[in-house]
Image (cartoon, rainbow, N blue to C red):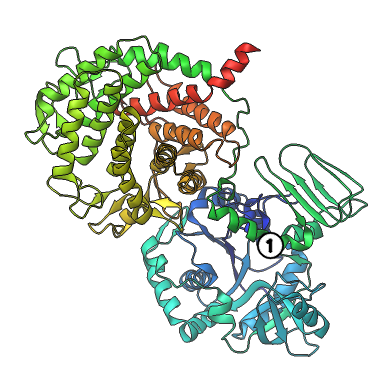
Amino acid sequence: MDCQIVGFVISGGVGSRLWPLSREDNPKQFHDFSGDGSMLAKTLRRLAARPKGDTPIYLIAAEKHAGRVHADLASVNVSGGGAIFEPVGRNTAAAVAVATMQTLDAHGDSVMLVVPSDHEISTDAQFWRTVEDGLAAAMDGRIVVFGMRPATPETGYGYIEVAYDGNTIRDVSRFVEKPDLATAQHYVEAGNFYWNTGIFLFRAGAMRDAFRKHRPDIWQAAELAFSAAERDLSGLYLPLDEYTDIPSTSIDYAIMEKAEQIAMVPAGFRWNDLGSWQSLLDVGPVDQNGNVTIGDVVAIDCENSYFRSEGGLVSAIGLRNMAVVSTSDATFVAPVSHSQNVRKIVEQLEKSGRLETRFTPAPDRVLTSGAWRRRVHHWLFEETLPLWSTKGVDQVHGGFHEALGFDGRPRLKPKRMRTMARQVYAFAVAGARGWDGPADELISNGLAFMQRAGRTDRGGWVRTLNVDGSVADPVEDAYDQSCVLLALAWAHSCGNPDALRLGEETFAFLDAHLEDERMIGFLENAQGVGSRRSNPHMHMLEAFLAWHRVTADRTYLRRASRLIDLFRTSFFDPNSWTLGEFFDETWKPEAGEAGSWTEPGHHFEWASLLMDFDSSSGRQHDLMCYARKLYASAIANGLNRATGLAYGAVSREGIPLDRVSRSWPQAEAIKAAIALDGTGGPDLKPEIEERVGRLFRWHIDPAPTGLWIDRIDERGRSIATDVPASIFYHLVTALTQYLDATDDVHSAGTRN
């Protein structure tokens, strides 16, 4: 028939059974397993290859993969279709409901073809002949499924039982879950059971009626989400709040197991869902011994085995029916008959927060540890510290300039207390690292300016000063107090005579005016106004740990421990591995976008601070699991894939909310990788070098000497108008830690 068929490709899931190749940031549908394009691209091309008839093609995918989806769509004539993006996965019932609504809205009561994105099918012609065989039944109002006659007792597939008859269209008796081996053997012998391919054909009106009858709750919630969706030339974007409200279940449970008169057409094509290493062995190009070898592999006296190397040499002798898959950071070995159980490995790794489940190491990583030492050392001690210790100092009014222009001249902006404190801290760190500049003089200058008008009658510190040092904003903000405490700790370590007294007075103010009376964190300010944020608490933790390091007084660790408890109970979401930013007074995430707002840079900061607390408190890696999860989540979902830089913010589901990449998150990524390196996970030294390289590639090297480009858009273009001094401490801390972490490598190289 030449009638219109509206095609929908469902692209979701992680494909954990193909770990370590398939991961959250690079799921299996984006992989090229056979050398002719990604599985997703091949599926799109298959739908576009219909021999006759109008076939608009839509793709339903995760919004966090939008960039990759658009790349695959660009090569296919979608005939008026396009992309539909889910903000969060809600399983296949929600996707099919939205697909049905899109069809009714744009194409009327047309026939729809719904296919997964990750199946291997023999030829386009055979596929379309089978689909056309079911078209009459679909036109007649029946939901049509396509079954594959089982060749083996496969336990990884669902089954369809049909009535015995010799017609092309079979009546479905029931759907059966994935069976055990004995049951699967029975199904094969019975002759009337078929593998469920997950491909459906139906009229939009028939599916709408089925939802209204069997799952009206899903249909109604999906209608709300669909009606609130945003549409532009790049696709249809479903709203997070409304889409999250849709019950999460599969189309099989929601509709197929309940609907009447479902028809099945036996598939006239070869099919494999490529859901395991066994399946890739079944469809791959085999040698004379039945082996599939991909990459740098030497296999001797091996049979019927799957070998894949994404990095170094893989060698094997005498293996039979095995899967050996090696990536740059992980190796998986198992009998191919057990490859359906890879999820057990992934689940075990997830429990301990292993990085290897969430992100894929970049292919262009620098493999030589310490490769950036010379450039880092020169920039720190010969370029930026000399500049900021002269041009960045206000010689007229005291203190430090809030920002410099790209010409090195000061921008006369109000001076935030946090910036003054951070400059004190940065010069103290530089002095401790051996900088021969006037660190003590700069510390004294900064503290004198801060005290002159920045102290309040209650012993706290104001938020902002005018250029001349007069008070611009008298609010005693928790964020600013934390920055001051951090600066005072390091000033005390450098021998400043006033720092200890000022620190004690600031702690007294903190306890009296900013501590929550419920003993759960701190107020935003002494007036108790504003939503609660995790960020000031992170900087408080940083300050408490600094005071413990300087004084060895465990009182500060007890203070820090209370913030760690708040992190565990309120800030960290164990399901998404993300850190919340905005909360109400009961420490519940705020409603709307604010409650979903996460910042990759803060994930990195918390990761390194958690490892610092773990080390200082002697908890023996109690917090390592959390630190790994924060780092992995930020790398997997928080990076702009075009530049490799961290976004400003993403949702808990990995959707970019602030696409600008600032310099400080890139610095904090370096610190986090250094903190996690050598803790039992993968070797992160190449990751550290990559992070340093990207910081210089995008933020430092394009800027005038001693400065940096703070803001870069999603295409890698500078949108910075000046250079904020508040970032200086991030860069100095991260890069001095990098020099410290690679000292041994440098010393060894010198000795050799």
Residue at 74% across / 90% down in the picture?
163
Q: Nearer the viewer, residue 729 or 98?
A: 729
Up the image or down, 524 lies above or below 134; here it is above
Q: Is residue 79 left or right of residue 607?
A: right
Q: Which residue is mark 1?
A: 341
Residue 521 on image: x %, y %: 25, 49
Q: Quadrant of residue 421?
A: top left
Residue in view at x 42 percent, y 51 percent: 578
**Quick one: which residue is furthest to the left in this view?**
457
Q: Is 174 located above or below residue 291 in the figure?
A: below
Q: Residue at x 21, y 26 (%)?
A: 500
The residue closer to the viewer here, 90 or 750, is: 750
Residue 577 in picture, x, y percent from top left: 46, 53
The kind of residue on which mark 1 rests is Asn
Is residue 351 found left or right of 424 in the rendered image?
right
Q: Residues within 10 Å of mark 1 (few under 14, many from 20)?
A: some
The quadrant in which the C terminus is found is top right
The answer to whether residue 241 is visible is yes
Judge by depth and name the residue closer to the eye, 345 or 327: 345
Q: Secondary structure at mark 1?
A: helix
Q: Specify the quadrant that holds the N terminus.
A: bottom right
Q: Is residue 624 left or right of residue 405?
A: right
Question: Percent from the top left, x then y, of residue 580?
Answer: 35, 51
